[in-house]
Image (cartoon, rainbow, N blue to C red):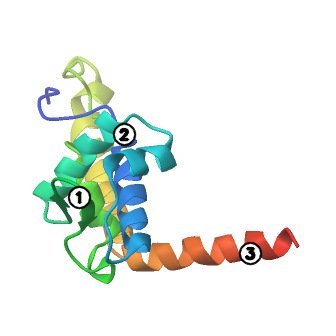
Amino acid sequence: MGCEGKMAGLSSRSAVAIHALTMLAHRGEGSLTSAEIADSLESNPVLVRRILGSLRNAGLVSSTEGRGGGWSLARASRDITLRDAYVAVEEGRILSRHAHPPSDACEVGRNIGALLEVEFRDAERAMEERLDRTTIARLLQRVLAAERELASADR
């Protein structure tokens, strides 16, 4: 059990990707620049462009160059799940495994790796199944409902 192809845990890339997809869904037929998306995220446009590039490679967004260009959804927001965004931008596993093999001289060390592998794999599968149940369209509906609630509370 080495650390090849494994990551330390879930990064913020998924959150950035889902935020960008939701903004694009909100925009509708138009497009947004990476700078506009970065402004909403209060993030670096280079990071946002990198994430958008991964989303484009996964067929979730498209881009047009030149004046009036920008990013738009490549599929209907009802056909994009949070899992689609996660898979497009995350690499490796969510839950970290042992970075190097534990001691075979210890009964815990001899057995823990295989047991954790099953537990972690099941947990990761459950998370992916949960993310698969929410679409970008549904998330946008919830964002807009939350915004209406805020607006009525401010009155």
- The reply to whether discs 2 and 1 touch (Cβ–Cβ < 8 Å) is no
State the quadrant of the C terminus: bottom right
Q: Residues within 10 Å of mark 3 (few under 14, many from 20)?
A: few
**Residue drawn at (29%, 34%), measured in percent from left and top?**
46
Callout 3 secondary element: helix
Q: Residue at x 66, y 70 (%)?
A: 147
Q: Residue type at mark 1? A: Gly
Q: Position of residue 38 (x, y in %)?
A: 42, 44
Q: Nearer the viewer, residue 101 or 5?
A: 5
Number of the label disc, if any, that sits on residue 11:
2
Real-space Cα separation, disc 1 to disc 3, in angstroms: 33 Å
Q: Are marks 2 and 3 in contact (CB under 8 Å)?
A: no
The furthest residue to the front:
67
Neighbour tally class for label 2: few under 14, some 14-19, many 20 plus, Cα within 10 Å? some
**Residue located beneath label 1 in the image:** 69
Q: Residue 136 placed where, x, y %?
A: 38, 72
Could you tell which of marks 2 and 3 lies nearer the N-terminus? 2
Horizontal placement of 81 versus 140: left or right?
Answer: left
Per the image, label 2 sits on a secondary structure element best described as loop
Residue where numbered disc 3 is placed: 149
Left or right: 8 with respect to 6?
right
In this rendering, the answer to whether 2 lies above or below 15 is above
